[in-house]
Amino acid sequence: MRKALLIGCMISLSGLLHAQTVIDEIIASVAGQIITKYDLEYAIQSYKYQSGIYNLEDEEELRCRILEQLIFQKLLIDQAKLDSIEISEEQITQRIESSIRMQVARAGSIKRLEEAYGKSISEIKKDARQVVRDDYMVNQMQQSLTAGINVTYQDVREYYQQIPEDSLPTLPVEYEIAVITKVPTVSEIEKEALKERLTGYRNRILKGENFSTFARLYSEDPGSAAKGGELGFVNRGELYPEFEQVAFDLKPGEISPIVETKAGLHIIRMIERRGDQANVAHILLKPKPSIDSMVRTQKHLDSVARLVRNGGWSFDSAARAFSDDPNKISGGTLINPYTASSTWSEEQLDQTALYTIRKLKEGECSDAVPFVTEEGNQAYRLIFIRKIHPEHVINLTDDYEKVKNAALEAQKQKALVKWATRKVRLTHVEINPKYHNCDLSENLGIQF
């Protein structure tokens, strides 16, 4: 476990969910970058959450290994700064949005995710920016330091053969799936009715009624409604472009006209502006499809499913012809954002999808299944099982790519450990005496 932890990615955004408040103290300093007790506890909770392992026989050993990882990450960040590696605000926003989409899918809805965090989506995103920035710099440095490292077929065989037979891992069942997605249309009548309502709120606010009161009573943004619609300070690039373009042009106290984004219809109030940061409040109304539109969409997808089952269309062709999903050009293949592959383990699927998938065999297509898009809108999709990989002990025949990746990571690991021991000798590192019981010599070469 020691070296495997060393080159792990920075603690992911999902770790914020289980971070616990602790009394802070500095436990290490690396090239002027501090590691606090909160950082360590946060990382430990995140590791447990991601691994699903909450009760460990040797908690102190884990604590030392994660401290080692945090020191290593600070070394990488220091080197990234020396090498002038930078990440734009737009890149940070894109990475946060991608992580939020994955977590919303796992939680089932934006509201459930916000309830789990005890924060609004805007607050979650704001808190994650430094984590994502550091994560990017760590990953870029790791890629730079391991560029050019490859493994041959013989390397892969030798790596596999040195694993004791009774230690070979059992891989869980995995699925390769594809989807056809349809979002029910919202009538212009519904949109116009909402615009009329929102215009009414705006007019009353302009005449002196309280914006916050209207937001608490009527806004459909669960994260900000209870706070009078206030989002808190946000940077440029963190919001929908249409929203941001209007918001940053407002003067303090000014109320915007109606703005339409993927989330719905908004009116925005500027609270305070600080350069490229702004604290704004908004009232959101979401246009909703009628019951007739929902029924038509469901029936339409069920008819597509029948065409696929009867052999009139291949699923790939039907996806390209009928799906609203951007991945339709690949025949609707659903890419796993956790692994960037087309395979999904059961724990990586949302519960609604998993319930449907478990009832299907290879080559079968589901009926229309309701789900919620990342914007919180109701939609339907067909789920098609391309392939089921049953649970099995890993082997070179069926899992060559997985073994190859593991062998490659082992080679990269050696290179990174070698780099870290050199970097430590050139870097000012201080460790709180309370943690001198940790053996940091094997991977970092730190002696007490």
Image (cartoon, rainbow, N blue to C red):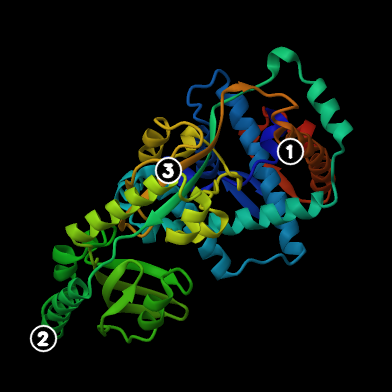
- Picture disc at residue 364: none
The amino acid type, in three-letter code, at marker 1 is: Asn
Q: Which secondary structure lies at badge 1?
A: helix
Depth check, mark 3 against mark 1: the one in front is 3
Location of the N terminus (image quadrant): top right
Cα distance in 3D space between marks 3 and 1:
40 Å
- Picture disc at residue 405: 1
The amino acid type, in three-letter code, at marker 2 is: Lys
**Looking at the image, which residue is at 15% across and 65% down?**
218
**Looking at the image, which residue is at 75% across and 39% down?**
409
Pointer 3 local density, CA inside 10 Å: few below 14, some 14–19, many at least 20: few
Location of mark 3 (residue): 310
Position in image of residue 316 (x %, y %)? 52, 52
**Looking at the image, which residue is at 55% across and 60% down?**
329
Q: Which of 268 and 188 is in front in this view?
A: 188
Position in image of residue 332 (x %, y %)? 51, 52
Cα distance in 3D space between marks 2 and 3:
62 Å
Quick one: label 2 or label 3, which is nearer the N terminus?
A: 2
- Give the mark count: 3
Residue 130 relative to residue 164: left or right = left
Cα distance in 3D space between marks 2 and 1:
64 Å
User: From this viewpoint, is residue 54 visible?
Assistant: yes
Above or below 386: residue 74: below
The amino acid type, in three-letter code, at marker 3 is: Asn
Pointer 1 local density, CA inside 10 Å: few below 14, some 14–19, many at least 20: some
Depth check, mark 2 against mark 1: the one in front is 1
Q: Which secondary structure lies at badge 2?
A: loop
Pointer 2 local density, CA inside 10 Å: few below 14, some 14–19, many at least 20: few
Quick one: label 2 or label 1, which is nearer the N terminus?
A: 2
- Picture disc at residue 207: 2
Position in image of residue 60 (x %, y %)? 58, 25
